[in-house]
Amino acid sequence: MPKPHVASWYADTANPSRERPALDGDLSADVCVVGAGYTGLVTAIELAQRGHSVVVLEAERVGWGASGRNGGQIVTGFNKPVSTIAGWMGDKDARLLWDLSEEAKTILSGLVETHKIDCDLRWGYLLAALKPRHMAELRDYQAELEGLGYDKTRMVDREEVRSMVDTPAYLGGLYDAGSGQLHPLNYALGLADAAEKLGVRIFEGTRVTGIDTGPSPSATTATGTVRARFLVLAGNAYLGKLVPSIQSRIMPVATYMIGTEVLGENRAKSLLPADIAIADINFVLNYYRRSKDHRFLFGGGVSYSGLDRPDLKRVLRGTMLKYFPQLKDVAIDYVWGGHVAITLNRTPHLGRLSPTTYFAHGYSGHGVALTAVCGRLLAEVITGQADRFDVFAKLPHAPFPGPGPLKTPALVLGMLWYRLRDLL
């Protein structure tokens, strides 16, 4: 039996969704997709629209991993400046990647509109500055965006920020009308419904235990095998040790959220009058928004060790109260977490294991949007249009340092430096 979705505000407010059967026996299809998160589901939709038969195998439930637990924030661009990417790949390829990141948001909004996905999609976003250095960084970032022709941002001062969010913590920020928010689990469930209406077969509770990446690829489970012409691996942080050759290029990182009790419409609006999503720009950042039922959803803190803190609720609440002491009388109804996959250079990792087997993962905090375009690129390369996929696959991805059991401690030590930089 598949595990239920992790207890969260998202799970408690999820749209109705039927339980799908596990694979029972052997099947064949044009394409077999491993993982029913955003990447796998968008890939399946794009392929089905092109006339391909698709089977999706999910170890738990649709959207069970990061796709159903994340902060729900749709963020412009990548986790690295385009200028940095240009230093790796040249201006032409970096410009194409920027254009693809903008296409991602168009694909996402088109999926929501076309398939009538009820996921509270809203636009408007603030990158908030806690110190003068942050303001300088945001001005540089805005200048780069303007140089790319992106005209949806504007710098805001302390007074205007205070009209958007009721905290004195920020010196100012960068408002982005082209970033936004949604209910992540409902978006995933809506993608699954859309895929099935196009003929995609989705099996839940069906963990893939082995793959064949040869000329006639296949995915093997405890209850059957799917044979296909192409195989797509879309497990992200939950792919585990299925493919050791790419496992070292990503690191599962735990991230956490809390949800308050219902604040009431007036109090929720006074806290966040602009009803936008907000994040600061610390390396270990805090992010938050208000919910449709007038709660405050606050995310922050990460664990690179793979171990959750036993006092997680208290710690997250304490962080929230540093910025919003007026919430000291408010109870916390929800606390949850999950794993996202990061890469060493903080850009998505796409590639081929063989001429018949492709993968995409490691979105490094920008997966809500970028999974949409990566799903399209996977569909393109499978149908013989490899140009755009190949540019994305050129992003340089080194393995995380440290062999075997030393890999995680090495990352923890590296991240400690960034935590200290945030504090200082």
Image (tube, rainbow, N blue to C red):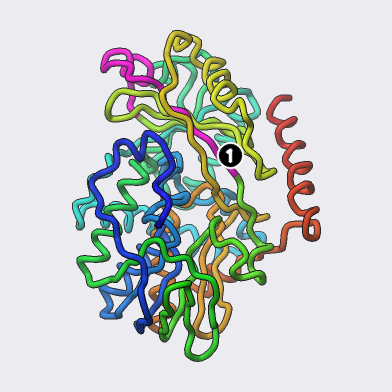
Q: Is residue 8 magenta?
A: no
Q: Residue at x 30, y 67 (%)?
A: 45
Q: Secondary structure at mark 1?
A: helix
Q: Start and end of the magenta stretch?
A: 254-275
Q: Is residue 102 above or below residue 50?
A: above
Nearest the camera: 228 or 142? 228
Residue assigned mark 1: 140
Q: Is residue 280 left or right of residue 259?
A: right
Q: Is residue 398 left or right of residue 229?
A: right
Q: Quadrant of residue 294?
A: top left
Q: In the image, residue 315 lies at what x, y percent?
A: 59, 23
Q: Quadrant of residue 87?
A: bottom right
Nearest the camera: 65 or 2? 2
Q: Residue at x 26, y 80 (%)?
A: 51
Q: Is residue 200 above or below residue 336?
A: below
Q: In the image, residue 28 lies at what x, y percent?
A: 35, 84
